[in-house]
Amino acid sequence: MKYLVMVQGAQVDYEAMVGKASAHSPAWSEGDLQAMFEFMSAVSDDLAESGELVDSQGLTEPARTRTVAAGPDGRPVITDGPYGETKEVLAGYWVLDCESLERVTEIAARVARCPQPAGAPVYPVVIRPIDESDGKPS
């Protein structure tokens, strides 16, 4: 079965990673970033080696986001940037093909142990099964 394993973050987290501390998160050092990237690369390398990795990507900061919605008249309403009502956003993901929910949970638990500086916010790792049905009700 395929699963989407998601990690979360906020705009202030991306800013902390480039050295801008806030009340929400301390500034990350070059060593902190290197440790995080090495950890995530090792996870992805291990999953590729086991044959469970389908895809994985880190996403750019929320400030580079664009949202498109239908307005009341049906015409598109386009908004750029982060939104006050949205605190956390998807920061990166893996699409995995695992034999069980237990196995993907083991992987998510490993991802949750990613190194970060003391005082940085801790976000859950979210697992969502991917619906591979034909989309028709059973």
Image (spheres, rainbow, N blue to C red):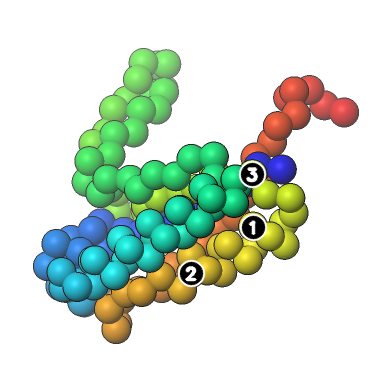
The span from disc 2 to disc 3 (Cα, nearest Å) is 19 Å
Q: Which mark is residue 112?
A: 2
> Tag 3, which secondary structure?
strand
Report which quarter residue 87 is drawn in.
bottom left
Choose between 11 and 44: the one closer to the eye: 44
Which quadrant does the C terminus fall into? top right
Q: Position of residue 30 (x, y in %)?
A: 15, 69
Q: Residue at x 18, y 61 (%)?
A: 15
Residues at discs 2 and 3 in contact (Cβ within 8 Å)? no
**Residue extending furthest toward the right:** 138
Choose between 2 and 50: the one closer to the eye: 50
Q: Which residue is mark 1?
A: 104
Q: Which residue is mark 3?
A: 97
N-term mark: 2 or 3? 3
> Tag 2, which secondary structure?
loop
Q: Which mark is residue 51?
A: none
Q: Nearer the viewer, mark 2 or mark 3?
A: 3
> Tag 1, which secondary structure?
helix
